[in-house]
Every structure is written in C-alpha cells, then in structure tokens.
Image: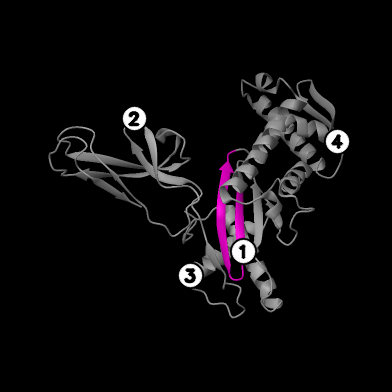
Amino acid sequence: MAGLHILRLMPEPTAVAMLYGQQQLKASQESMGSGSEKIALIFNMGAGFCDVAVTATDGGVSQIKALAGSTVGGEDLLQNMMRHLLPDSENIFKSHAVKQIESMALLRVAAQDAIHQLSSQISVQVDVDLGDGLKVYKVVDRAEFEEVNKEVFEKCESLIIQCLHDAKVEAGDVNDAIIVGGCSYIPKVKNLVTNICKVSEVYKDINPFEGAVCGAAMEGAVASGITDPFGNLDLLMIQATPLAIGIRADGNEFIPVIPKNTRLPARKDLVFTTIRDNQSEALILVHEGEGNQAAEENHLLGYLKIIGIPAAPKGVPDISVCM
C-alpha cells in the first residue's frame, strides 16, 4: 500500500543483533583482529510484545543462538496502571458513550504520563478531572507500580531465562545486555535484565529506539547487493527461526517440521501417511507457532492439496513434506 518493496522479514531482536555484530566487527578491526567471542542478550519490549534473543559474535560472524517471545508488553503495564488509578474503570466506562470514551482517554494519558515520570522519579502525583464529577487524585510510587505489574515482569523474567536455556548459555557468560523498545527506560526492566545476566549495566552503544531500524537497514542493504567501501556490511549474520514451522495432523495436533531456533538456511523432511483406506487426497495445512500448542492455536501460513494418491490401505502411502 505504501509502495515499499519487501526484501525479507526478520524479528526485531535479530535486527538489533545485526547492528551489535557490526559494532563488534568494527571494534575487532580497530584492535587489529584481537578479541574473543561476545555473547549478548537482547531484550526488546514494545507496546504489545516482548522479544528476547541471545546472540554470539566472533570476528565477522554473528549467530542467533535462541529467540523467545510473548504478547506481553507496555500496553499491559498501562492497563494495569489505569485499573490501579481507577479500580472500577472498566464498569464505569462500559457503555462506551462519547463522554465515557473521552474520560477513558484522559485516564489513559494520565496513567501513561505517570509511568513515564516513574522512570526518573521515585513517586508521582496523579491529579486528573475525568468529567461528570469523576476525579482521580492519587500518589503512586515506583514500588507500587512494580507491584501492580508483578505478573508482567515475572513473564519477562521467565522469557529471559527460557531464552538463555534454549541457547545453552549460562547467565554469567553474557558479556552485554542490550535493552531496546519503548519500555527500555523503565528501571524495573533494566534491573530485571542486568540482574539475570549478571552485568553491572546495560549496553549503551545502541539507541533503544533506533537499534532495530539500523539493523534492518543494514540487512536491506546486504539483500539489495549494495557494496560498502568502509566494510560496514561485511558481517555474516546467521539467523534462526523464531517459531516452529510444521503441519496440522489428524486430531488437530501440530507436528513441527522445522523446530524453533533452527539455524537458517534450513531444510527438513518428514514423512506422513493417510488416515483412511483408499484415501485419494490430502490437505496439508502449514502452521507457525509453539511446538507444544494445538494446531488451531498457531498461525496458519498456508495450505496445499495433494490429489491422485494411489489406492492403498491407510498407513501405506508415504507423503513426504519438505520445508
């Protein structure tokens, strides 16, 4: 619609990893090639998502070792804060009348401002007139905000631990912790990441709001065949699948063909068969998602229909699925 030519898709943490890898490559070149493998954990939390990646960079090669993600994000923090400021807000504004929508918008702005201020202040005073005699006056401190969002931060913590486990990396082996996204300035987020990774501070050489864009621009330049005399595009980026890709089997079971965190490029084959005698057709539904979920809970990527299967008892024909 916007006239953009899409070259390829990549997860945001992978784009950040590409920028980080380029920075490490440049540092290695400036030090005449000295240096060792650098392990970085990338934590990316936006409005409606939280993504984590573990990357290993050595010389001119950067590899994504593991990816983990969730739909938890800054919007959850905001909604919890709104409920904290006005506990019965969902019932008060349930009719969605124009005035109620305006009041809800005022409450949302007040909650958002409070969260922003709590990133640099210990406490904040919220004083907002929502109209129709409804006012909110409350002093909220940082500890209160963190307690209100305890479950959100616990989910973030579990994602980091899961990603380190999938990457087979010990927390103490992480050299750099990189935080990007709209929630990067929240003190609890910083403390969460640095404490788990056992680093004293977050990596400061990547702008939290520009890291993914810069990495994506580099990937776009490489994919377009652009040459760079300064060597900024000499990095070899080895990516991984953020989710498992597989097919829907009988009984709504999701069978991964390419597991999550498989190094790219990849090719996998699995052999399936028929479920009825003399079955002449088979519908192959391709899904993307977590390997432990039912097929319908995952994202449907597409489908294909196989026709002309020779008549045979069920379980005899071999149907090879290659991805």
| C-beta proximity under 8 Å, tags 3 and 1 | no
Q: Residues within 10 Å of mark 4 (few under 14, many from 20)?
A: some
User: For the point 82% across and 36% down, which residue is it?
Assistant: 142
Q: Image check: 90 left or right of 121?
A: left
> What residue does disc 4 label?
124
> What residue does disc 2 label?
251
Quick check: 147 above or below 219? above
**Of residues 283 and 3, the one drawn nearer to the viewer in this rendering:** 283
Amino acid type assigned to the residue bearing label 2 in the image? Gly
Q: Residues within 10 Å of mark 1 (few under 14, many from 20)?
A: many
In primary-sequence order, the first of circles 4 and 3 is: 4
Q: Is residue 208 visible?
A: no
Q: Which percent across, then down, holds residue 182?
A: 69, 47
Q: How far, Cα to Cα, is label 3 from label 1?
A: 23 Å
Quarter of the view holding residue 88 = top right
Q: How far, Cα to Cα, is label 2 from label 1?
A: 42 Å
Magenta-drawn stretch contains 41: no
> What residue does disc 3 label?
224
> What residue does disc 1 label?
57
Amino acid type assigned to the residue bearing label 1 in the image? Thr
Q: Which percent across, then down, holds residue 316?
A: 19, 40
Which range is magenta? Answer: 52-71
In primary-sequence order, the first of circles 2 and 4 is: 4
Q: How far, Cα to Cα, is label 4 from label 1?
A: 42 Å
Quick check: 307 above or below 96? below
Q: How far, Cα to Cα, is label 4 from label 3?
A: 49 Å
**Of residues 8 and 316, the one drawn nearer to the viewer in this rendering:** 316
* SS type, badge 3: loop
